[in-house]
Image: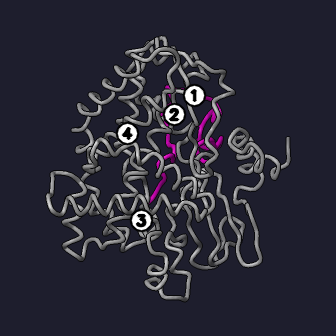
Amino acid sequence: MESIETIYQSNFKENVYPFYKHLRANDPIFAMSQEPNHTTWVITKHEHVKEMLKSKSFIKDQRKLSSSDPSQASQENGDFNIFQNMMLDVDPPDHTRLRKLVQPYFNPKTIKDLKPRISEIADALLDKASEKQGPVDLIDEFAFPLPIIVISELLGIPSEDRNKFRKWSNTIVAASDEFDPDIMEDVQAFTNYLTDLFDSRRKKPENDFISNLLQAEEDGDQLNRDELYSMVVLLIIAGHETTVNLIANTMYALFEHPDQLEKLKNDTKLTTTAIEEGLRYYSPVDFTTARWSEDDIEFHGKTIKRGDLVLASLASANRDEEKFEASDTFDITRKPNPHVAFGFGIHFCLGAPLARIEGEIALSKLLERFPNIELTEKLSTSPWRPVFLLRGLERLEVTMT
């Protein structure tokens, strides 16, 4: 086996699962990088990941560790505040307040009511894709537009503007690996677009989520300006990014395992468990976003110091052989399936019910319409996007017969 350093640094996405397996067995609380005053830790075992995500010792708001005034830092960061005030990156009580504000729009009953509309969108996209001659990129034609149309309709974003979010979203997600000053052009464009959209909705409110958020901002104690921008950015990006990967990754796994694809085509009732296995096997989110240790603590034999960055590998936890029998086997009948693809604890993914329903509808509609769908390219030529936090394919070229 290659050294851990070699596996981690080269072809990371292709070699990651043997790497995680090695870590779980030998160094499950792994010091990925060490600097004089700072260590970055990666937690890989299922039990440890859940414990860390539930613990109050690991905080989301890094500004709490600074002696400077957080409000001063916010003023200096300008437009970049749309990332620093996301619900995803704050702690209680702010997190509790923000989540309570949007939870009614994403509860299972509300999402269930969307099923007829999601089905209509899926049918229309497949109608359009079937008209194309030759191979079709399943991501461009189906896996991407389905969730972006759904979240855009929920928010109230005009249909002609939806494709703008793909470029902005890709730029911003890629910047999660390492901050690049060049992304500020896209951040500014995103901010300017939202400003114009908010102005339009203030003048003429509609029956959409953005109009309701604007009302919450006016109420003052519920949502401030930076939180408003952050909330919409988060819902646009998180509202489609995970689902794009869920649909494409699950289809990719099915192509890799023809026996499972055949089993699903013969028994459509397995769609629900197939989606759950897709979430586990090729987790759409590889790592949780950053947490920091608020104090020096001992965590399963390692000393994690105040200010250390701590990441949980959801992908590794979902392949933990201590939790899942035959953990490296893709099995669409797997029950129970206690994966943590949507996280755990208070930051459990708000959009999980929506992603699940979109995934189930996408899979069932696709195989119903095109039971002989085939992968056009060899499996090895469908590269994973080089994004640290996420697992998603660059493309998935298929023949839809």
Tell me which label, 2 or 4, sits earlier in the chain. Answer: 4
Element under label 1? helix
Q: Report the residue marked by disc 4.
A: 147
Task: Say which of marks 3 and 2 sits in front.
Answer: 3
Per the model, the C-alpha gap separating discs 3 and 1 is 32 Å
Q: Residues within 10 Å of mark 3 (few under 14, many from 20)?
A: many
Q: Residue 253 — which label?
A: 1
Q: Report the residue marked by disc 2.
A: 278
Give the vertical position of 378 relative to 86 (above or below).
above
For the record, the magenta segment spans: 317-345
Circles 1 and 2: CB atoms closer than 8 Å: yes
Question: Is 39 colored magenta in this rendering?
Answer: no
| Residue type pointed to by label 3 | Met
Q: Is 5 displayed left or right of 174 in the figure?
A: right
| Residue type pointed to by label 1 | Ala
Q: Report the residue marked by disc 3.
A: 86
Per the model, the C-alpha gap separating discs 4 and 3 is 20 Å
Q: Is 23 displayed left or right of 132 in the figure?
A: right
